[in-house]
Image: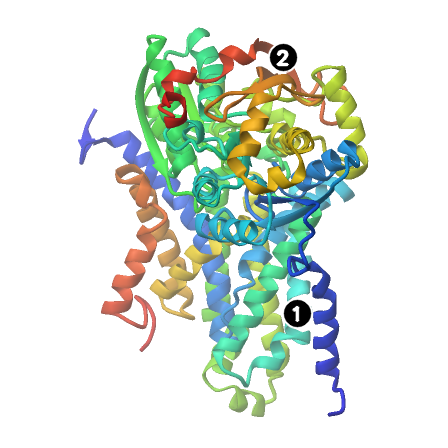
């Protein structure tokens, strides 16, 4: 058996793959943040809570309505996305003319409130949610044992990321979006309803977080804190990738998942810190992020 | 100034929040015993005690009745942060709180231990697991209630080695509790002729994906994966171990610390067959069922576990000691009231008869349970079957091995 840096090669490959799986979550989450920041200039700190709401909504659909995982995958982004639309109309839209800081404070506060409400209602130790029967079991890859569900998460995340990228870069709607990001009054002058587009974009970003939550429900404990653990890392991912850069957040998400995975083998104690070390280095060398425009 | 909508709203919100603020400013009645429940009300360990632990304390006060002095229970959230916990403890003791109890998270538990010793005030820890509380860090004002890492290691670890699990790999939460649990379990594994193939220490509480550590554990060819963690971390580890098919391929999981709410969170389908140790289970005998029934109006659908009900048990014993020595004497010295508690035998429905040793260790039996399968479970919260009982005298670390300075003097 070959060793690489003192670690058996099969173990290393396994860790790379696991890193890629975690990276899939980072990519999906940071993508939603990037889309929202790109158009709304809002740093959406409620994103972690919306991810958690996605997982809880999947649980509620199953327990209260008897709707299985596949229905949840379809319905949850619509439901949670709609709550995002309501939130944008009622509160966030009032802050566009103010400094970034106000949007950050509002969304951060909302995130805490939502988390508190769920904790009060459901406690902190979490709820059980099973892997759908179609995706149970595992593939033996020779160097490791890969649960089918984890493979599915990577594929689903890749497809979603790619579709979002195509939507924004290659379609007419995406062109409007990009144009509104550059100069909203001008686009509005051409007869595009920019406020509605902004609202729907926020809803779309939130829906991405909610799908992330549904995908996470069977593998992580469905508890009110599940988003908090993720959101800080995801913000670091967005900063490293470059605020508002779509492709940047996807590539950085997957890349940092792998870096984190490797850290878990070589020095596990630092696995929660390594991403922030990278963030500090990137901010010193390229303040706009790896893919951002200065 | 005419009231605007905003000022009205602010006033309303302010008025709603007012009653929630601690009412410590009131003139202190010399005839009132004050008990502060300090625990996690918002984080990973909330469900283990949190609001339930407060209710159990109140139940004890109610059952104790009126013995000529008033008892007031207050509560706060230490957010699992040692600095926050130590600050609240200092403030409480200075403002006339006579006893602080609960305090999960070993790093916080040890910090409050120092404050209690410095202020000469009583401190009963029920939530922290570290056996150092009655070892090198023991104090004359501290009592450690229903469990510790040594007791868990001896019961669960000892049983696993006996059943043939003679090689171990630890997945350890990187703070005081995880380290103590790994250390104590390692000692038992080695003493029984087993070996430790390796361990990983992961950052607490920032980790939710354990697959990487589980795969490393599997690669080490160990027969047992020891989970030296608690709460949501244990839940995630077990869920993901099932997902990666680790247990199906003959590797055993040792959940070294697991409480009833954790089993509830994982669900019997995934948790069945796990072996764990608690010193209380609501369905254990007639007395435990009786106290659980009495607690039902307070806890609603939730059953107590050893941590939340320990607050009930220790509050009762503390109040008996206060009644025995008088309120004025009890308020004067934490050391004196704790000495009185050590001199009196304990007995309550939750843990049965017991004693408190010179080093502050409360002795009670430990029970090794196996989690039932969904088919065996007949009612909600019917989760455990008893495998083995370790009597109180053998369950904990022998008095002379802990290195507690109180024992030598």
Q: Secondary structure at mark 1?
A: helix
In the rendered image, the quadrant that contains the N terminus of chain A is top left
Residue drawn at the location 33% of the way across and 57% of the way down: A276
Q: Rounded to the nearest whole Å, what is the CA distance between mark 1 and mark 2?
A: 51 Å
Total marks in image: 2
* Residue B203 x/y as whole percent: 38, 43
SS for callout 2:
strand
B318 w.r.t. B111: above or below: above
Q: Quadrant of residue A241?
A: bottom left
- Residue in view at x 66 percent, y 69 percent: A87
Vertical order, B246 against B139 (above or below): above
For the question of whether residue B361 can be seen, the reply is yes
Compared across the picture, whether B284 is left or right of A46 comes to: right
Q: Nearer the viewer, residue A175 or A285?
A: A285
Q: Position of residue A194 (x, y in %)?
A: 59, 82
Horizontal side, residue A22 vs residue A46: left or right: left
The chain to which mark 1 is attached is A
| Crowd rating for badge 2 (residues with CA inside 10 Å; few <14, some 14–19, many 20+) | some
Q: Which mark is residue A87?
A: 1
- Tell me if label 1 and label 2 are in contact, CB under 8 Å: no
Establish whether labels 1 and 2 are both on one chain. Answer: no
Q: Quadrant of the C terminus of chain A?
A: bottom left
The chain letter for the residue carrying disc 2 is: B
- Counting from the top left corner in percent of width and height, residue B200 is at 34, 32
Q: Nearer the viewer, residue B228 or B200?
A: B228
Residue bearing the label numbered 2: B386
Q: Residue B236: x and y, percent?
A: 51, 36
Residue sitting nearer the eye, A7 or A137: A7
- Looking at this view, is B402 or B202 the one in front? B402
* Image quadrant assignment for residue B313: top right
Q: Is residue A141 visible?
A: no
């Amino acid at each position: 058996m070959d060793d690489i840096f003192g670690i058996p090669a099969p173990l290393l490959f396994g860790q790379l793959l696991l890193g890629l799986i975690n990276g899939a979550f980072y990519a999906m989450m940071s993508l939603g943040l990037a889309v929202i920041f790109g158009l709304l200039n809002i740093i959406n700190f409620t994103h972690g809570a919306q991810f958690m709401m996605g997982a809880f909504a999947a649980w509620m659909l199953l327990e209260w309505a008897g709707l299985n995982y596949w229905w949840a995958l379809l319905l949850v982004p619509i439901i949670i996305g709609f709550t995002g639309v309501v939130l944008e109309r009622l509160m966030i839209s009032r802050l566009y003319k103010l400094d970034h800081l106000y949007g950050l404070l509002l969304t951060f506060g909302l995130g805490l409130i939502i988390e508190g409400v769920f904790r009060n209602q459901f406690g902190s130790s979490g709820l059980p949610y099973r892997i759908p029967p179609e995706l149970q079991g595992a593939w033996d890859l020779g160097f490791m044992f890969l649960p089918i569900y984890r493979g599915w998460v990577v594929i689903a995340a890749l497809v979603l990321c790619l579709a979002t990228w195509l939507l924004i870069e290659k379609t007419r709607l995406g062109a409007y979006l990009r144009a509104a990001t550059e100069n909203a009054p001008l686009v509005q002058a051409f007869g595009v309803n920019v406020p509605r587009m902004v609202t729907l974009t926020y809803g779309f970003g939130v829906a991405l977080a909610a799908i992330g939550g549904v995908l996470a429900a069977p593998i992580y404990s469905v508890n009110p804190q599940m988003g908090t653990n993720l959101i800080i890392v995801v913000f670091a991912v967005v900063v490293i990738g470059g605020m508002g850069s779509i492709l940047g957040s996807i590539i950085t998400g997957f890349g940092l998942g792998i870096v984190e995975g490797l850290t878990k083998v070589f020095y596990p104690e630092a696995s929660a810190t390594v991403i922030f070390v990278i963030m500090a280095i990137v901010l010193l060398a390229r303040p706009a992020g790896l893919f951002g425009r200065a | 100034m005419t009231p605007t909508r905003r000022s009205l709203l602010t006033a309303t919100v302010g008025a709603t929040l007012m009653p929630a603020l601690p009412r410590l400013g009131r003139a202190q009645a010399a005839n009132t015993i004050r008990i502060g429940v300090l625990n996690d009300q918002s984080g990973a360990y909330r469900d283990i005690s949190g609001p339930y632990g407060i209710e159990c304390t109140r139940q004890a006060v109610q059952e104790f009745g009126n013995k000529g002095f008033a008892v007031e229970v207050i509560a706060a959230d230490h957010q699992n942060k040692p600095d926050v916990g130590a600050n609240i403890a200092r403030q409480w003791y200075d403002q006339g709180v006579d006893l602080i109890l609960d305090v999960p998270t070993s790093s916080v538990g040890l910090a409050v231990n120092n404050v209690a010793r410095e202020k000469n005030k009583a401190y009963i820890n029920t939530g922290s697991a570290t056996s150092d509380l009655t070892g090198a860090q023991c104090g004359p004002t501290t009592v450690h209630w229903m469990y510790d890492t040594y007791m868990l290691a001896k019961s669960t670890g000892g049983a696993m080695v006996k059943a043939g699990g003679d090689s171990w790999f630890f997945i350890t939460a990187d703070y005081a509790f995880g380290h103590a649990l790994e250390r104590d379990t390692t000692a038992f594994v080695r003493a029984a002729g087993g070996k430790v193939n390796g361990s990983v220490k992961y950052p607490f509480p920032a980790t939710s994906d354990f697959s990487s550590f589980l795969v490393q554990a599997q690669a080490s060819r160990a027969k047992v994966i020891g989970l030296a963690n608690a709460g949501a971390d244990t839940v995630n580890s077990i869920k993901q171990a099932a997902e990666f098919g680790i247990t199906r391929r003959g590797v055993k999981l040792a959940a070294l610390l697991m409480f009833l709410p954790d089993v509830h969170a994982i669900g019997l389908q995934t948790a069945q067959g796990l072996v764990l140790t608690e010193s209380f289970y609501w369905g254990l005998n007639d007395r435990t069922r009786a106290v659980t029934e009495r607690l039902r109006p307070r806890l609603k659908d939730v059953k107590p576990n050893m941590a939340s009900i320990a607050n009930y048990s220790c509050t009762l014993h503390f109040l008996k000691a206060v009644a025995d020595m008088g309120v004025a004497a009890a308020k004067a010295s934490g050391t004196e009231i704790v000495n009185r508690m050590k001199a009196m035998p304990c007995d309550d429905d939750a843990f049965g008869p017991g004693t408190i040793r010179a080093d502050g260790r409360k002795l009670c039996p430990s029970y090794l349970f196996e989690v039932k399968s969904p088919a065996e479970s007949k009612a909600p919260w019917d989760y455990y079957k008893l495998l083995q009982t370790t009597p109180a005298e053998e369950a904990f670390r022998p008095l002379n091995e802990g290195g507690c300075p109180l024992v030598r003097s």
